[in-house]
Amino acid sequence: SLLVYPIYYVYIRLLTVDRVFDWKKHGVYFLPALLLFLLYLAGVLLMTKDEHLDYLYRLLLSGEKLRGIFLYQKSVYLTCRVVFIIQGLVYMWLSIRLVAANKKNVQNYYANTSADNLDKIYWLNISLFVTIVFGIILSLIGKENFVSDEKSLILPSVIFSVTLFVIGWLGNIQRAVLTESGDQFQDPVIERIEEEYEPDHLEDIRKKIKLLFDEGKIFLNKDLTIWEVARVVGTNRTYVSSVINNDFKQNFSSFVNSYRVKHAKMLQGNNPDISKQDLAEMSGFGSQVSMKRAFDNLL
């Protein structure tokens, strides 16, 4: 059970900021569970089979005073319950922060930000919240209180079954909305984040971006990302982001969509009978919904 929250959190990271699973990076989240497993395993190995069964079915749930290996094993068990509760609170906080930051940052990297896709990540977060809350409540109650009445297990079983189904269903239809550059987008030669922003250099980048959008109409690419703009301009994502944020006072998504909205208005003026679907596709929007959202945001 100590692996539930870390695995859930790592999964959300893989949907938002991390491109692939990496033991060096993500393995640290599993260390508490591994350590307590080894401590518990040591206790099991030090007991005979009869002692272990007696501990599980009588001593663990009894209130009698324990000594020796039995006291050690129950201490590990109680520690697991405490760690489980702490994990729930910590991962709830981490996950909320991660998803909130991802929603904000994704607009600096992608032109078409699917609200539907981001909402699914939020629902995953909500399912995590529900799982954590009920997990903490049941941990505080203790499994010993369910032994005498098996019917009392119906409610927690239904709750966890539903949340697991929601997790699996959302995970099956969800695609990643990454906000880290990742190996796929980085150019080790031109990516120099540590370089200082020289005014002349940034002005040159600004002119290239304007030319690319005004004459090259790169915004018509519905899958446009900031990495693609940086590649065409011949610089890195950091410089492009800096120019758009500081000079144009917009994030990448709103900057691109401002051009798309202007283009859509021009097309509509030339052909008032054009369908919304055709208008969205010819203006670079991923869908009618994203076009409507862009128009509403720029009003």
Image (cartoon, helix red, strand yellow):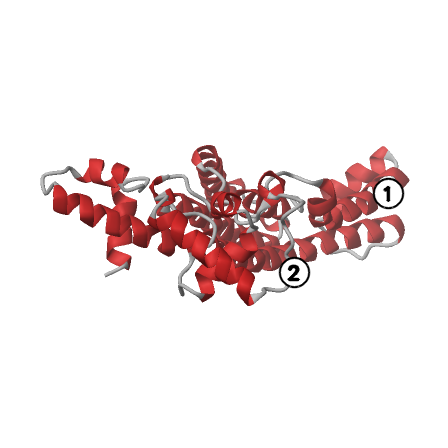
Q: In the visual, does 114 lie left or right of 165?
A: left
Dot 1: element: helix
User: Neighbour class for label 2 at 10 Å: few (<14), some, many (≥20)?
Assistant: few
Disc number placed over residue 195 in the picture, else none? 2
**Residue that carries the numbered disc 1 in the rendered image:** 42
Residue toward you, 58 or 223:
223
User: Which image quadrant: the C terminus?
Assistant: bottom left
Q: Is residue 95 visible?
A: no
Q: Position of residue 190 (x, y in %)?
A: 63, 48
User: Which image quadrant: the N terminus?
Assistant: top right
Dot 2: element: loop
Q: In the visual, does 62 lie left or right of 216?
A: right
Q: How many marks?
A: 2
Residue toward you, 232 or 126:
232
How far apart are the two marked residues, 1 and 2, measured between alpha carbons?
52 Å
Whether tag 1 and tag 2 are in contact, CB under 8 A, the answer is no
Furthest toward the left, the residue is: 273
Q: Residue at x 61, y 59 (%)?
A: 90
Residue type, label 1: Ala
Residue toward you, 235 or 287:
235
Q: Is the residue 139 above or below the residue 157 in the image?
A: below
Residue toward you, 104 or 48:
104
Lower position in the chain sequence, tag 1 or tag 2: 1
Q: Residue at x 37, y 49 (%)?
A: 213
Q: Position of residue 260 (x, y in %)?
A: 29, 48
Q: Position of residue 226 (x, y in %)?
A: 48, 48
Q: Residue at x 33, y 41 (%)?
A: 220
Q: Residue at x 43, y 65 (%)?
A: 247
Q: Is the residue 103 above or below the residue 151 in the image?
A: below
Residue type, label 2: Glu
Q: Is residue 163 visible?
A: yes
